[in-house]
Amino acid sequence: MEVELEEIRDFFARRPPFEALPAEWLDRLPEWVEIRYLRRGSPFPPEGGEPRLFVVRTGAVALFDRHGHLSEKLGEGDLYAGQCVDLAVERAGGGEAIEDVLLYEIPCQRIRWLRERSEAFGRHFTADLRERLKQALGLVQGSDEGALPYLWVALREVLHRPPVSVDTGASIQEAARRMTTERVSSVLVVHGGRLVGLVTDSDLRRRCVAEGVPVDRPVREIMTPEPHTIGPEATLMEALALMTRLRVHHLPVVEEDGRLLGMFSTSDVARMQSAHPAYLVSDIAKARDVAELAWICERLPRLQAQLVAASASARQVGEVISCITDALTVRLLALAEQALGPAPVEYVWVVGGSQSRREQSVHSDQDNALILADAYEASAHGAYFEALARRVSDGLQACGFPYCPGDAMATNPQWRQPLSVWRDYFRRWIETPEPKALMLSCIFFDLRPVHGTTALFEALQQDVLARSPGNSIFLAHMVANALTHRPPLGFFRHFVLIHDGEHDDTLDLKHRGTVPVVDMARIYALAHGLPVVGTVERLRAAAERGALSREMAENLEDAFEFIANLRLRHQAAQIRRGVPPDNYVRPAELSELERRHLKDAFAVIQTLQETLARRYQVHALT
Amino acid sequence: MLERLFGLERKRRRALDQCPQGPLRDYLAVAPPAPATELEAVEIVSLDLETTGLDPHRDHILSMGWVVVRGLRVRLGSAERHMLRIADPVPAEAAALHGITDDRAACGEALEVVLPRLLQVLAGRVLLAHYARLELRFLDAACRRCYGGPFLARSIDTLILAHRVLERRNHTIQTGDLRLFALSRRFGLPTYKAHDALYDALATAELFLALAADIAPRPPRPLKWFLAGGRA
């Protein structure tokens, strides 16, 4: 029986994606609708039944990410497709009705039926290539670019320095001096490595100065004995709750086996509330030796995972991690100069690869080089710069950035040369290109100065950007090089045949996904003399010059971001599981929709690769 | 309360014994849900009748609209709307109110066709209406006229429930506060422009969900907490 429910129909007819439906399907829509009432505070989506699409009719719903961080608010007419669209499930940490809600529900099966019949309607769920990628990005990242969900961070992540402690036998004055030199407001009192007490600034004031206790008395006389402690896995939230209850400002953090890990204080909350990575950078700048730097950097993998969990994009994460590595490099150079004395000639420390492009993730290999002033003489200055390079490179390794397997590091004498030699290198690479040499040297086309005399780098860069644009043989070789990494479109044909997770094939998201885009962006930069290094910046600058259509540049940017985000999330999941992160994704890890988006992204990359191959007549080289 | 509920069951059995073969007998043969049944497991038919007046013996049913609530979800797919054919001219007041003209009333369905359909839908279910007394009395009169037996049903009345909820919230209840439209608005529910039996049935169903959530947000919430009593 056909029953007219015009007001329900019109409610849908006014809203995307339903507005795209032809009248005949709109008329049928109401009969598939079920109406539910959710009282404020009820969980969302409501449990039970088949997967459904939800539309808020009246009231409001808040959605949270996995950390309980508000990610989206749904109001009247807003739609939640989380159960109908695979990709959205990932971010669905659930939600809650924040007002009384009248909810319309339509089974996903019906939505699928409509999608199959109405192209325009379906597009909302799988819009055209570009929109789909954009949408996928939105879904992968979540919609909120807000702050870190710092309240849910484990204390282990918050501790920013090793514990400052004195022995029970120490005098009050010794304790106070220690606090002054360490610039802390409290000191832990230990006996045989075990925590026995705590002394704070206010203890010194109230129990010592105010009471007239001589400062040579043992510190145990004024300490708070057996203070309350907290475990490292407790969240910041739990620590704050405990501190509020106990009315204390300091909580020693103690491992289960009694090992003292550090001190958590209310000032750490401020630290967490502000941009955490920024504090990390300032901690790095203050670190006194490699051991301390290594200790700080132990938190990097977790920081990256947190950033991902907090919906940061690959681009944002890349910038944060690169910024930290820059700070680390600068600090290591300063420490090296402290130990070795000032440099005998001017130099600039340059970085290549992902750090240079600001696309770094933790566990990226280090790529670096030294450009020395032409006043350099190997016999007189060689030992100094070798030692400098060694210290920095070893320091980076100690901090979790492994040596470059291709030996593209300043420790390699080949990459520790005066400017004139570097000019020769680039002249040779550009004017008489050899495929093999180019493959090894391509990271040097992404150089960025981090510390030292920037003018040395600028001179070199100007040279390169002046030489490369007109040199079509060089560019053709670069293109040929870039084409060695092809997106694995065949992978999907294979995959669709095998529906279970039985096969061991994995997908290398780096070499088959992001690297081809990085390579192509580099070619555009070299072909058009663009001084920028970041992949996205290069694509944008190329579009600006008209070297690349704006649409293509945007598609490629979206494809790059999508693959980079997938890779990042894959790595974040590995870090959470305690597995070393890699680039190999098993198809079973991907949702149906992610696979579709990935395929689109690969198709975009392939299209541009073919365009470049034609333009530079790469076939002529082989 | 209990006696009243069990009284309904006794009445139903007696009526069943005396009722001749036909739609009413078929309806009475199915026991309504027991008062202890969890509300979620109860199937409810939200019904609205539009009539030419308030006297079931003199006035006529102009139209009927209903929708089923199952698992505390309104199933719009079950919605039905029936315009009834009546011989007498529609009184001007009712015509203006319901937008039903003599022409339309004349080409509607016959009560003898719609009533069996409604009884079929109501069998084994609970009747829900705003001021259910009216629906119960009109259906009782119709059944007696058509089938020579009484209409008996468990019923839920949103007017009674709303009164209870507002009283509990210490609201002074004023004239008009308990009207369906006013209540829908008060509970933040959609208000429908069309004055029509089906939209009223739908609004009643939505109001009921809101009231039920207010009275008992989560199980246990046995049906008996919501019943208006079994009197026809």
Image (cartoon, rainbow, N blue to C red):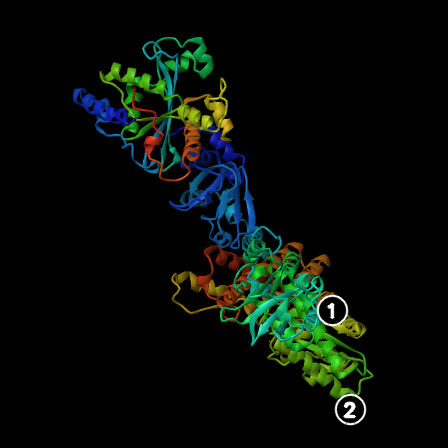
Residue beneath disc 2: A379
State the quadrant of the N terminus of chain A: top left
Disc with the residue nearer the chain's start (1 vs 2): 2
Residue A72: x and y in percent read 56, 47
Mark 1, residues whose alpha carbon is within 10 Å: few (<14), some, or many (≥20)? Answer: some
Is A506 situated left or right of B25 in this image?
right
- Spatial CA distance of label 1 from label 2 is 37 Å
Query: Residue visible at 23% across and 17% down?
Result: B147
* Camera-side residue of A433 and A536: A536
Is A606 situated left or right of B6 in this image?
right
- Furthest toward the left, the residue is B17
Q: Chain of mark 1?
A: A
Indicate whether A192 appears above or below A47.
below
Query: Residue visible at 72% across and 74% down?
Result: A350
Provide the secondary structure element on which disc 1 rests.
Answer: loop
Looking at the rendered structure, the kind of residue marked 2 is: Ser
Residue beneath disc 1: A469
Residue A186: x and y in percent read 65, 65
Indicate whether A522 appears above or below A434.
above
The mark closer to the camera, 1 or 2, is 2
Q: Chain of mark 2?
A: A
Looking at the rendered structure, the kind of residue marked 1 is: Pro
Question: Is residue A528 visible in the rendered structure shown here?
Answer: yes
Query: Residue visible at 74% across and 76% down?
Result: A334
Residue A109: x and y in percent read 40, 45
Quarter of the image where one finds residue B128: top left
Provide the secondary structure element on which disc 2 rests.
Answer: helix
- Furthest toward the right, the residue is A375
